[in-house]
Image: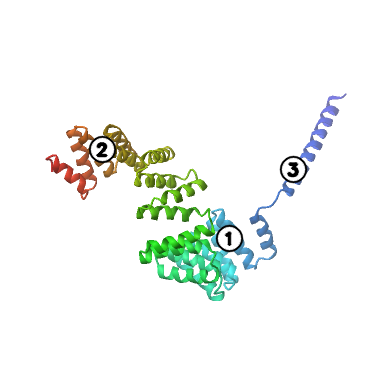
Amino acid sequence: MNRHVFVASTIAALLMVACKNNQETSEIVENQPKTPIDSLTALIEKNPDNAVYLAERASQYLDERKFKEALEDIDKAWLLDSNHVRVQLIRGDVYYVLNRTRASRDSWLKCVEQEPDNEVCRMRLAELYLAVKDLEAAQEHLKVVLEKNKTNANAHFMMGVVIRDLYGDTDRALLSIQRAIEIKEDYVDALDMMGVLLTAKGDPLAIKYLQNALEYNPNRHDLIYKLGYAYMRFGKFNEAMEMFTKATMLNPKDEDSFFNMGFIHVETKNYSIAREYFDKAVKANPESFKAYYGRGYTNEMLGNAKAAIEDYTHALTLNPEYTPAAESLKRLGRY
């Protein structure tokens, strides 16, 4: 075969394969499912003045943390139709994430003025007012929600927080939070709060709530720490050590867990081991005056007065108002 003919034939064959591959690739791309943003963009191109489409795309952008695009879309939607409830709701969401809470409040207030029974907007307002510590306003919106829907677990939980912070009534707060759990048994935030409040009250039932919370989030560091603290609070030192150890494996800079493990060994008079944990707490956070104090105390108990004085002095340097360190130095004749 003539070389030129062979080359031409080969190129033609390659081009045919390339064309086929391009066609197949094009078909694959065309057949790929569109994202919600793609679908909304197509709708907006056909209906550029549709405020709801723009608002919905803003919501999608918000989910993807594309804040600039979300703001542009919701502002356009607001100009087109500020009386549409969906636009009001999403505008509030966008501005809330951007920490422009006044605009959020105004958007959601406009929503409930138009639709007094709009549960979503009222819950958003309650959350906002709770965040800015306007507890009376939060309570008013939660009351309206619960009058209409007694099975709203989030509303019961938030009402519990309001009652605790507004009236200081832990018992009533616990009743509201417990109601939230009865409605939604996997409500981790409510289980968490019940555990913390019951621990503070000295009720060992706290352990069960925190165990349940941890079942749904087995690697959540703060829950592991709180369960460890509850175990320690109620004298279950072995279980507490297990939780605190796990907490430090998840977060090697967890000074509180190291400190508490040191405290447990002080309680059992294992001062050498306690000192090791306080030393780890110091290394985790060199600014922890409590960790220096704890290490100083174990040094004192182990007969190392010089090291104890150094640690107590450093604790007092970090926090001049820390009375235990000052008293310890006085006891050792150095203050």
Q: Quadrant of residue 249?
A: top left
Q: Nearer the viewer, mark 1 or mark 2?
A: 2
In the picture of the structure, the residue carrying the numbered disc 3 is 25
Q: For the residue marked with disc 2, what is the amino acid?
A: Arg
Q: For the residue marked with disc 1, what is the amino acid?
A: Ala
Residue drawn at x 44%, y 69% is: 139
In the picture of the structure, the residue carrying the numbered disc 1 is 58
Circle number at residue 295: 2
Q: Is residue 291 above or below residue 192?
A: above
Q: Is residue 110 above or below residue 16?
A: below
Q: Are marks 1 and 2 in contact (CB under 8 Å)?
A: no
Inspect this view and state whether residue 167 appears: yes
Q: Position of residue 147 (x, y in %)?
A: 52, 71
Q: Earlier in the sequence, mark 3 or mark 2?
A: 3
Residue drawn at x 56%, y 74% is: 115
Q: For the residue marked with disc 3, what is the amino acid?
A: Thr
